[in-house]
Image: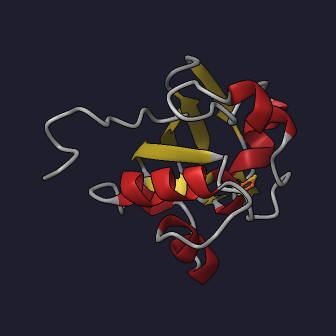
Amino acid sequence: MPTIRFTKEKKEVQVPEGANLRQEALKAGVSLYNGINGYGAKLNSIFNCHGLGLCGTCTVKINKGAQNASPMGFLEKLKFKGLPTPDPMLATVNALHYIGNEDTLRLACYVKVNGDMDVETGPEFNVTGENFFS
Ligand code: FES
């Protein structure tokens, strides 16, 4: 059974192989809807697409074990590359956040867990850091 470690929450759960990351996080009481650097978290927790892959609010970063996640699908790639969403601000942030994190940034609702992984929920978006414009 794969183990998911939610690093910010310091929580570890064992899940069946092929389990959906979003569903397992919610079952474990881990909040995926953390807004943009914490802003909008309350709104996102209400106004999200509930796992349909449409809103982009369930973005996570798989810091370890990304190879154990199911491959990124076509729609997920489009989402990170600026596919219009109900929230254009979020679409822009996701697209910018994706640069440099192509192998680790995922939408939790798309990910099937096939092995151990360390997951960072609500990855911070660094708009002033040295890597932003590089
Ligand atoms: S919950 Fe909306 S994209 Fe994952």
What residue appears at the point 44 percent right and 61 percent down from the top-left corner? 95
Along the line of sight, the residue nearer the viewer: 3 or 134: 134
Residue 120 visible in the shown view: yes
| Residue 5 vertical placement versus 87 (above, below) | above
Q: Residue at coordinates 54% horizontally, 60% vertically from top-left?
A: 69
Horizontal side of residue 27 vs 104, given as left or right: right
The relative height of residue 131 versus residue 55 in the rendered view (above or below) is above
Ligand 1 is found in which quarter of the picture? bottom right
Residue at coordinates 59% horizontally, 26% vertically from top-left?
39
For the question of whether residue 72 can be seen, the reply is no
Q: Position of residue 9 (x, y in %)?
A: 58, 18
Vertical order, 93 against 85 (above or below): above
The total of numbered circles placed on residues is: 0
Instruction: From this view, report whether residue 82 is shown above or below residue 64.
Output: below
Q: In which image quadrant can residue 56 be found?
A: bottom right
**Relative to 107, 49 lies left or right:** right
- Residue 86 x %, y %: 74, 60
Q: Residue at x 61, y 26 (%)?
A: 12
- Judged left or right of residue 23, residue 87 is left
Question: Which residue appears farthest toward the top when viewing the image?
Answer: 10
Residue 122 position, x and y percent, is 55, 34
Q: Position of residue 10 (x, y in %)?
A: 55, 17
Q: Residue furthest front?
A: 88
Q: How is the model colour-coded?
A: secondary structure
Observer-nearest residue: 76 or 47? 47
